[in-house]
Image: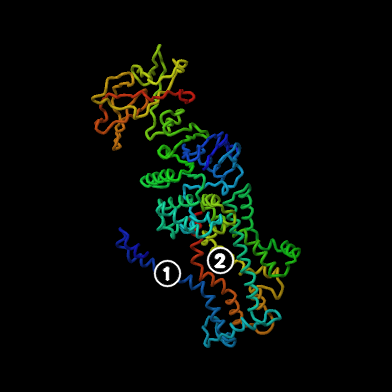
Amino acid sequence: MADGHARLPGHGGSDLRAMLLRAVLYGLLGLFAFYYLLPLVVMISTSLKSLDEIRTGSLVSLPEAVTFDAWAKAWNSACVGVSCNGLKPYFMNSLLMVVPAVLISTLLGAINGYALTKWRFAGANMIFTLMLFGCFIPFQVILLPMARVLGLLGLAGSIYGLILVHVVYGLAFTTLFFRNFFVSVPDELVRAATIDGAGFFRIFFSIMLPMAVPIIVVTVIWQFTQIYNDFLFGVSFTVSGGVPVTVALNNLVATSTGVKEYNLDMAAAILTGMPTLLVYVVAGKYFIRGLSAGAVKG
Amino acid sequence: MATLHIRNVFKRFGQTEVLKGITLDVADGEFLVLVGPSGCGKSTLLNLIAGLETISEGDILIDDAVVNDVHPKDRDIAMVFQSYALYPTMTVRRNITFGLKIRGVPKAEREAMVREVAEMLQISPLLNRKPAQLSGGQRQRVAMGRALVRDPAIFLFDEPLSNLDAKLRVEMRHEIKRLHQTLGRTVVYVTHDQIEAMTLATRIAVMHQGIIQQYGTAEEIYNQPANLFVAGFMGSQPMNFIDGTLEADAEKFWVTVRKGEAEGLSIALVDTDPAWRARVGSAVVLGLRPERIRPVRDGDEASNGVHYILQRAVDVVEPTGADTMVFFSLGGETVSARARPQDGVVAGQTIRLRFGMRGACLFDPESGQRL
């Protein structure tokens, strides 16, 4: 870009100015990057220190003797509440909740989006508008009614209950994503497939879903991040042994007994945040691409 | 073997009436073209035949069985769409076999059928490609392959050539005609292009505002248009319309043109109808195809009543290669004539024009109907 800029006709004498602007730009970007990364750096360095070193050294100093004890403890043996098995079991809880909740809400959203755009029925737009409201309802509003519903369904305090809550809450978003994608798919495809003899689900699975890969990636990332990072539903609708890792992290950090183990807290926090980070690093490229693809077409 | 009967079919979308009582009978093996300007209801009618839309009123019969409530897949039809509607994630082979697979045709048989159709359409080397890797013409062939492989009783085409460039369009037109001649299947073909209609059809239904204006062979529609709309719509250079008054004496009829003329012209009519007597003295529109008007050439026999000769200044000349279109004014309208390039007509020149009055049409200016 810098080259292209410099070569523009009529800008011959301003090479120096362009370079200066670049320098200021990169300087500013670097500054912001540093500003945002600093907490992570402090977290990582603290997690690698021993408790003694934390007590004697300063907050920003790098560890003198690197030790992974805190990480091991956070994973295996830290005490969350009364049980001292580390975060491991709670990771399992989160996984058992996130995977089905993401898959179910994505699949249902895809079917919704497909039905709302390709099998238009009277009131389809009305239903879509109503579903959109779901995107704007604050979590706190539904806590009590949802607790009542889960109680009536016999799902209170279970992972299944939590999955149900996340699926219902996620549907508004997943439907929106898929609806906006499928609205750009020509209706003639459905007509052609109908004449070929395909029905509602055959068209969906054989033709629509394979086309929707970019938006599936976007939806899965979005839903994974939302559901995995959720704290409020987790803390409200599960009981001690079954809490997701976000709640467990809170319980671990908030322990009031004994010495405050900062290195342990930091390691646990990073561990907890790892899956979402990983998803972004691996699939972030597709996320951006999928979002913009939808934007251009929609 | 398939006949198609459409009996007094209406289609309404809410308050709007798109089709207002369509009746058509199509014999087995016929190539019916539905032609008309956009919004005339021709695509809607095709969708009704396909079963993709429901009929508001009336009946559609395929092979004498009412199919109003029969699902598209059970109507024994195949359709080619304007946008081709190829399944983008499937290869050409899977696109073509998708319908067969759903119908439970065994794999070996499917493979043989694909091979045969691919051969016929010359798309064999493309079978493993995805639609995105094909050119417009190739996609068109694949779309036809998907219809052909099903070997249906009736083929439906919805403006299949309108997304192709001019040269490819002519090629594919030939191909479609050849396929129809080889297979002898009943075809219903929708287009807004009157040349496609003329070249392909065994019978044409000209539609306008949800009504069939005329249903007949290309020859009938071209030479005996039912009304002003059909006469103006069909023909690449539209029919000339000249306003005048119908006059007659004991044995002859003529049209007197006064509008835009210093002195009235009396153009004698050749193919007359005694019924016109009742109209003598009233306004009429004289319709003449451009090819009926040409410059007078050496060796032309003297006017014998079949021809009308007029001397006029040429306004505009448009050479098209094979012909040269010559425009002049008559009766306050611009009228076109078809000359040969070797006639050497130039703009501004005053020439003598010869009107072949055989095949001239008279229309009622009020109703637009041909008299």
Q: How many marks?
A: 2
The secondary structure type at the circle numbered 1 is: helix
Amino acid type of the residue that numbered disc 1 sits on in the rendered structure: Tyr
The secondary structure type at the circle numbered 2 is: helix
At label 1, counting other C-alpha atoms closer than 10 Å, the crowd grade (few under 14, some 14-19, many 20 or more) is few
N-terminal label among 2 and 1: 1
Label placed on residue A221: 2
Q: Position of residue B140 (x, y in %)?
A: 43, 50
At label 2, counting other C-alpha atoms closer than 10 Å, the crowd grade (few under 14, some 14-19, many 20 or more) is some
Q: In which quarter of the image is the N terminus of chain A?
A: bottom left
- Residue B27 shown left or right of residue B272 in the figure: right
Q: In this view, does A113 lie above or below B326?
A: below
Q: Where is residue B345 in the image (x, y as percent from the top left)?
A: 25, 30
Towards the viewer: B369 or A286: B369
Amino acid type of the residue that numbered disc 2 sits on in the rendered structure: Ile
Asked if labels 1 and 2 touch by Cβ distance under 8 angstroms, the answer is no
Q: Mark 1 points at which residue?
A: A26
Residue lying farthest to the right in this orientation: A152
